[in-house]
Structures are given as C-alpha cells and as structure tokens.
Amino acid sequence: MEIKNDSSSTSGFTLLGISSNPQLQKPLFAIFLIMYLVTMVGNVLIILAIHSDSRLHTPMYFFLSNLSFMDICFTTDILPKMLVNFLSDTKSISYVGCLIQMYFFLAFGNTDSYLLASMAIDRLVAICNPLRYDVVMNPRRCLLMLLGSCTISHVHSIFYVLLMSQLSFCASHVIKHFFCDTQPVLKLSCSDTSSNQMVVMTESLAVIATPFLCILFSYLRIIITVLRIPSAAGKWKAFSTCGSHLTVVVLFYGSIIYVYFRPLSMYSVVKDRVATLMYTVVTPMLNPFIYSLRNKDMKMGMRKLRFRIHS
C-alpha cells in the first residue's frame, strides 16, 4: 500500500493501540472509559468551582481553570478514537484524520505547557514581589498571557503538520501507537526525514524548552527568596502554595522530555507508549485531585459548589 500526501485517494493508517491482544480489548476499553470520565468530571468540577466562588477569581485560578479546559480538549482529541478502536476490528484512522489529531494534540499539549509556565510566573510574583502582585498580574496581562499561549501553540502545530504533510508513506501503514503521535508516524515515512527531523527538533526545542526554562527560572528565584525567610512556618507557607503546581510540572514534563528529546533512532515502542500515557491520560486525570486535595482554597470552593448543587 502506498500513501501519498498529494493523492486524492490517500489511504489511512491502522493504529496498533496499547495492545493487539483481542482478549484485552474490552477490559482496556472499560479502564480507559473510566479514566476519561474521571478526567472530564474532575476538570469540569475544577472549572465550575473556580467560576462559582468569587474568592477564587485570582490570576492563579484563572490559569488553573484554563488548564483544566485544555486538559479536557487534550484528552478528548485522543481518548474517544482510542475507545472506539478498542471495540473495532479495523482500528483505522484516515490520513486527514491523523493529521487533524496530530494538530490538536500538539496545539493543546503546548498550550498546557505555556499555561504551566504562566502559573509559575504567577507564583514567582506572588512570593518574590507580593506588594506589586495586583499591578503585575492584572486581568489584562493574564488574558494576554493566555492568548499568547494559545497563539504560539497553534502556529507551532500548523507548521509541524505542514511539514508532516510533505512526507510520503510506503509499505507498512501500521502506526505502533494508540494515536497519531509524531515519532511513530515519522517512522513509517519512506521519504528522507533527516531535514524534517532537524527542523522539527529545533522548532520543538524553542516551543517546549522556552516554557520549561521559564518554570525552572521561576522556581530558582522562588527557592532563593523562600530560603531568606527567617521562620520555618513562613518558609512552609510559601512553599505550600507551589506544591500542587510543582507536582503537575514534574509529571507533565518528565514524560514529555523522555519521549521527545531523543533522536528518532532511539524511539522505543513500548517504553514511549507508557511514557506518552502519563502526560496524555494520567496527568490530566490527576490534575483535579492534585489541586483540590492539596489546596485549601480549592477544597473550600469544591464544598461551596457541592452545597449549591444539593441546595
């Protein structure tokens, strides 16, 4: 089978999924359906709690509510098709559908990354320059940071997908993954992908590394500032406001760095599939628990929301 991007009769791909064992398809469907529902319900509750409690109308929770919305979009781009394929014999995805899935995967994933950087900046200003917090993190600036995050991410996705659309695909059309991720699709190309990989790696470094370095710089400044606080109670109070965010950052970036910042020759189907599950499925599902269980304000917001629902 030959798949050409310039052909009107372009064929599709087959997604191998998490496992090709027929006996595991229905149990895996049940597991990931539950995970998807938990992700949706948890993140929707975060958004509703923040918007219904005026005490949570602050920059930190503004970014958190948008992070929850992006997590909903991020998992919805991947999991519904994945769930359908668990119960399907063909497990196919069209060429155009594959590129569309790749586009939104990159767009929402990178927006998540920039929102985490925005939240790190928010914590930096709150801890290192609290007297100017309301001036620096004003609503207009927060909105501009959100719009900038979305714009950069979507421009990156357009550029990436345009590069992928120039490739030709021959022989095997089986993607050894549960969605159209960039590395597994590149593996199938019969075109020379060396220049493509170089451009993509450089561009990805700029898009992914920029918010990551911003987070590292922010926490370095925060640590230096907190260490100057004389009392242990003061240090703990300052650090406690960062705990939830830092946990999400470690989960999100740890798996992303493992998967993408390596040459294509080092790509491992099984190991990378597990790592990808971490940031595409597990992290969006855990985010609501991390932020609601480790944050007093969110706990109060959740209690108020529950009271309003039951009243």
Image: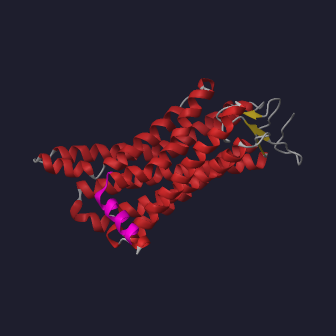
* Residue 300 within the segment the image draws in magenta: yes
* Between 81 and 307, the one nearer to me in the picture: 307
The magenta span reads 294-307
Q: Main secondary structure of the magenta part?
A: helix
Q: Residue at x 28, y 53 (%)?
A: 241
Name the residue at the bottom extreme.
311
Q: Which quarter shows the N terminus?
A: top right
Q: Residue at x 68, y 37 (%)?
A: 25
* Between 207 and 170, the one nearer to me in the picture: 170
Q: Position of residue 35 (x, y in %)?
A: 54, 47
Q: Residue at x 56, y 37 (%)?
A: 276
Q: Position of residue 93 (x, y in %)?
A: 76, 45
What is the image's colouring? secondary structure
Relative placement, left or right, of 82 versus 58 is: right
* Between 302 and 290, the one nearer to me in the picture: 302
Tell me which corner region of the image, top left, top right, bottom left or bottom right, holds residue 14: top right
- Marks counted in the figure total 0
Q: Is residue 274 above or below residue 75?
A: above
Name the residue at the left extreme.
230
Relative placement, left or right, of 56 versus 1 is: left
* Between 141 and 45, the one nearer to me in the picture: 45
Q: Position of residue 143 (x, y in %)?
A: 45, 66
Q: Position of residue 69 (x, y in %)?
A: 51, 59
Q: Is residue 88 above or below residue 76?
A: above
Relative placement, left or right, of 155 versus 130 is: right
> Does any portion of residue 220 appear in the rendered image?
yes
Q: Is residue 308 above or below residue 64?
A: below
Tell me which corner region of the image, top left, top right, bottom left or bottom right, holds residue 11: top right
Q: Which quarter shows the C terminus?
A: bottom left
* Residue 279 within the segment the image draws in magenta: no
> Does any portion of residue 196 appear in the rendered image?
no
Q: Is residue 291 above or below residue 7?
A: below
